[in-house]
Amino acid sequence: MPPADKPYAWRLAEAVATAGELLESLDIAKRAHSSSIGFGDLYRYATDPQSADSATAAALADNPGLAADWRRLMQNLAVYSAPMAAAAADRAALDRRYGDGWSLRLREVRKTPDQVWVIITFDRLEGTTPSWLFAGTLRHALPEATDGQMQFRIAADAPLVGALRDPATELFLL
């Protein structure tokens, strides 16, 4: 049916719908490209213990290009890393993650099942002992290593635990 044959209200509704779609796509593109977060912010978030910048974490979640820059930065800075895990059939399989020279294990705290132990074991510690665990963009300060092992307790429903169990999450120790 030619446009002139459509009732005015129908043509107006189509125009409004098209304009809405265009505005939505422009808004998405604007958010993806107008990040005010730069390399310095990423580096500071990765290396400065005082940097608790929620804006950087939010920008990393919203901007795929910035997330790719983050991943490259972490690959270069990390003392130890663990790649994405193969998809597992059950959660028990994801309670262990392996990297070159180290492993991470999650174990339920017996007396308080709403918490888990995060246990990091090193084959051998060389050079600087890592201070931070990064699971994707989430970070957690690490305790001192004792006999090649670090461990800490955390709430079982904490976002970090979910990220550690997610096979798509890369792990980095700095």
Image: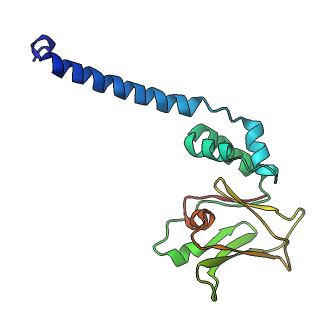
Q: Foreground: 34 or 73? A: 34
Up the image or down, 69 lies above or below 124; here it is above
- How many marks on residues? 0
Q: Quadrant of the C terminus?
A: bottom right
Horizontally, is 156 left or right of 39 in the view?
Answer: left
Q: Foreground: 130 or 7? A: 7
Up the image or down, 136 lies above or below 86; here it is above
In the image, what residue occupies the spot 81% across and 51% down?
A: 50
Up the image or down, 169 lies above or below 147; here it is above
Q: Position of residue 128 (x, y in %)?
A: 89, 62
Check the image and name the residue furthest to the bottom.
111
Colour convention of the picture: rainbow
Q: Quadrant of the N terminus?
A: top left
Q: Position of residue 107 (x, y in %)?
A: 63, 80
Up the image or down, 87 lies above or below 37; here it is below
Q: Quadrant of residue 109?
A: bottom right
Horizontally, is 28 left or right of 100 in the view?
Answer: left
In the image, what residue occupies the spot 15% across and 14% down?
A: 3
Q: Quadrant of residue 20?
A: top left
Check the image and name the residue furthest to the top.
4
Q: Quadrant of residue 15?
A: top left
In the image, what residue occupies the spot 77% across and 44% down?
A: 43
Check the image and name the residue furthest to the front.
9
Q: Position of residue 149 (x, y in %)?
A: 80, 77
In the image, what residue occupies the spot 74% across and 70% down?
A: 102
Q: Position of residue 169 (x, y in %)?
A: 59, 59
